[in-house]
Image (spheres, rainbow, N blue to C red):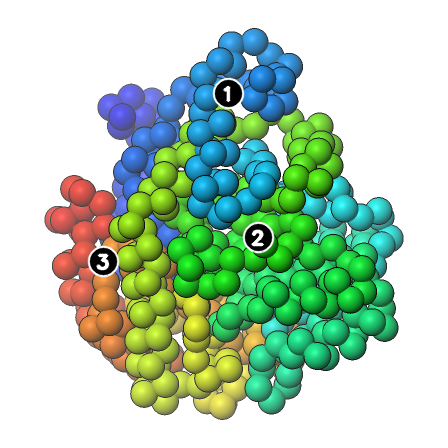
Amino acid sequence: MMDDISKTDPEILELVKKEGIRIRNGVELIPSENFVSKAVLQAYATFYTNKYSEGYPGKRYYGGNQFVDMVENLAIERAKKLFGTEHVNVQPYSGSPANQAVFFALLNVGDIFMGFDLSAGGHLTHGSPVNFSGKQYKCVPYNVNRETELLEYDVIMKQAKECKPKMILSGLTAYPRKIDFEAFKEICDEVGAYHFADIAHIAGLCATGLHQNPVPYCDVVTTTTHKTLRGPRGAIIMCKEKHAQAIDKAVFPGLQGGPHDHVTAAKAVAFKEALQPSYKKYCEQIVKNAKALAGSLMDNGLELVTGGTDNHLMVIKLVNKGLTGKGKEIQNALGEAEIYVNKNSIPYEPNTPFNPSGIRLGTPAITTRGMKESEMKVIGESIAKVIDNYTDKAIIEKAKNDILELCNDFPLYPGMEVLR
Ligand SMILES: *Cc1c(COP(=O)(O)O)cnc(C)c1O
């Protein structure tokens, strides 16, 4: 596949190779990232990228869609099987547009909804004032308990009774514990609100029984397809049959034009992979690795939000190390050691979102590489050393060498064994 680009655009090819070396020689701990299979990459790099197919299977606005329809129907069938949902739309371009479609389908501009506070673990699309969700709708944020840093459902219930939201959005982007979707449903039923869950991060765990599946407890559920689900960049929207028409209309023609059929093909492949027993084993290992990494970080003197993790992610609190607001510096120092993480707010963040006091990390990507508990121990030690000495070039260099040695045993994609 690379023969033509080597002639047409060697500059871009060189950058593709450089990225290959970066991901091969470093550990990817950003919890929203993963490495798709070669099969997913192959489905993605097909001439389905050329096709226009506005509409839905059997009801298109363009001709020549007989095979696109089959691809989209396969993606739909597989997603339904994976999550046990009544209806699914597989066309959303990504997580944020999928969420926008849900707002568009269920609410009117100006309506009140409740969403998870951004600094405590929610997503921008859950009501942040800089996002469409906070600009066009009235968000009443719910937060975690200041001491335990856990969600408190009785407090959320009380808040919901006071503000009477039309919708409550559950879901996380940085909360390291399980979410009780059934409890959210009880709150929604009590106040007559729609329940919308966004499982972008934990979709794989929900599909394999490692986390409660929100589908039975929700009007609508969205997920990205590129995080734990290990598919191409994109999203899907699942809903009860009674919302199917409103959701489909919100996606097209409400917000999007032609679906990205090459992405739909790659989504279908990823869903097929996720239905295999090996995927469940993979998800189990993600959680085991997260616990092992959290344990290693804490053994090496670091403090974690909520004191640990039940899912695939964790957030290091830099505050007690005297590093309040140093998330960016720590992220960069770890990056120099080829340990890739992202700076993140902590609950009740004392600093700013651009210079926050936390580091978020997770295990989906390194688990795909085949790393296990013993590797987590080494990675945790390296992270702790770099954080404690983040301006010390020699220590960063030592960590980088240790990480490279570790990565040499896990080549990532076939052919990357000797990539330097
Ligand atoms: C990642 C994420 C999204 C957004 O996905 P994009 O594809 O980046 O738009 C939405 N919701 C949650 C909870 C996420 O973690």
Give the camera-side residue of 193 and 199: 193
Q: Mark 1 points at which residue?
A: 69
Vertical relation: 285 (above or below) 146: above
- Spatial separation of the CA atoms under disc 2 and disc 1: 25 Å
Q: Nearest the camera: 4 or 44?
A: 44
| Residue 102 position in % (x across, y down) | 69, 45
Q: Mark 2 points at which residue?
A: 215
Seen at 57% across and 72% down, the residue is: 345
In the displayed structure image, the side of residue 124 where residue 278 appears, left or right:
left
For label 2, the crowd category at 10 Å Cα-Cα, with few meaning under 14, some 14 to 19 and many 20 or more, is many
The residue under the point 44% across, 29% down is 74
Mark 2 vs 1, N-terminal side: 1
Q: How crowded is mark 3: few (under 14 residues within 10 Å), some or many (20 or more)?
A: some
Look at the numbered disc 2 and give the secondary structure of its residue.
helix
Q: Nearer the viewer, mark 2 or mark 1?
A: 2
Mark in front: 2 vs 3: 2
Q: Where is residue 394 in the image (x, y as percent from the top left)?
A: 25, 77
Ranked by sequence position, the earlier of labels 3 and 1 is: 1
**64 displayed left or right of 403:** right
Is residue 54 placed above or below 77 in the rendered structure?
above
Ligand 1 within 8 Å of disc 3? The answer is no
On the image, which quarter does residue 398 sit in? bottom left
Identified at 60% across, 12% down, the residue is 62
On the image, the x and y values in percent for residue 172 come to 57, 63
- In three-dimensional space, the C-alpha distance between marks 3 and 1, rounded to whole angstroms, equals 35 Å
Kindly identify which residue carries mark 3: 370
| Residue at position x 29%, y 21% in the image | 4
